[in-house]
Image (tube, rainbow, N blue to C red):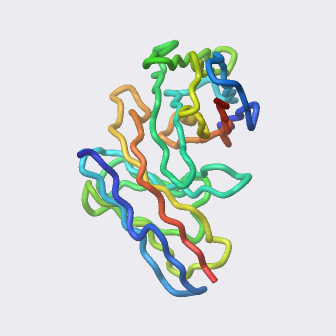
Amino acid sequence: EAQVTQNPRYLITVTGKKLTVTCSQNMNHEYMSWYRQDPGLGLRQIYYSMNVEVTDKGDVPEGYKVSRKEKRNFPLILESPSPNQTSLYFCASSLLRTGGGTGELFFGEGSRLTVL
Amino acid sequence: KQEVTQIPAALSVPEGENLVLNCSFTDSAIYNLQWFRQDPGKGLTSLLLIQSSQREQTSGRLNASLDKSSGRSTLYIAASQPGDSATYLCAGSQGGSEKLVFGKGTKLTVNP
């Protein structure tokens, strides 16, 4: 089954304790991306990657790191989480279109993170 | 910078009604426009993808159109059903990049 898998789905942590949210896709997609969703602000892009070892900042990259060492995995790293990073996080993937832009986006189920 | 706006923020209709959801964007150099559905506590599910060279896409009771000159996309839902109740989001790419910008969504309630 084609899917994007995120872990953990739920996490409560404390300020400053490094954490990683994993994302894996089994569709051989070039493009992967992370979003956060907050009430009143909608979905905002954190980072995206167009292929292995190629990553770019989205609109809200501050406080986050990513890596793309393998095509299927795109972990989101919070080196020193703060309460304002409490949010619902989504990973997504898609093929890249020859003429530019992404194809149909497939989303994970989301990871709800609370930073105390 | 691409900005995407969805109006209204919420919509309540009786079952069986045909309805239109609106999405407007500021940058006409858009690669593609996607419509998604999000159920409470769930991820997003892609409904329709309109590529930059296309004007519309259809899937079942759903039809999405894209007018780049006016900066608008619409999602038409025919014969709405209670199971269509969800939040519908549109997303467009910023010209020249694969950055995706989402609207804040329209929360649709279809009443039996």
> Left of A14 or right of it: where is A23?
left
How far across and down, in percent of the image, does residue A60 sit? 61, 58
**Quarter of the N terminus of chain B within the rendering:** top right
Q: How many marks?
A: 0
Q: Residue at x 64, y 29 (%)?
A: B112
Residue A7, image quadrant: bottom left
Q: Is residue A94 visible?
A: yes
Q: Residue at x 66, y 20 (%)?
A: B20
Q: Residue at x 25, y 60 (%)?
A: A70
Q: Quick check: B71 above or below A96?
A: above
Residue A91 or residue B40, whichever sits in front: B40
Q: Quick check: B59 above or below B33?
A: above
Residue B15 or residue A66, whichever sits in front: B15
Q: Residue furthest front?
A: B112
How far across and down, in percent of the image, does residue B108 sit? 66, 34
Q: Quick check: A98 above or below A86?
A: above
Residue A86, image quadrant: bottom right
Q: Quick check: B3 above or below A80?
A: above
> Left of A39 or right of it: where is B60?
left
How far across and down, in percent of the image, does residue A102 sit? 41, 35
Q: Residue at x 50, y 39 (%)?
A: B97
> Left of B52 or right of it: where is B26?
right
How far across and down, in percent of the image, does residue B77 sit? 58, 20
Residue B14 or residue A97, whichever sits in front: B14
Q: Is residue B95 visible?
A: no
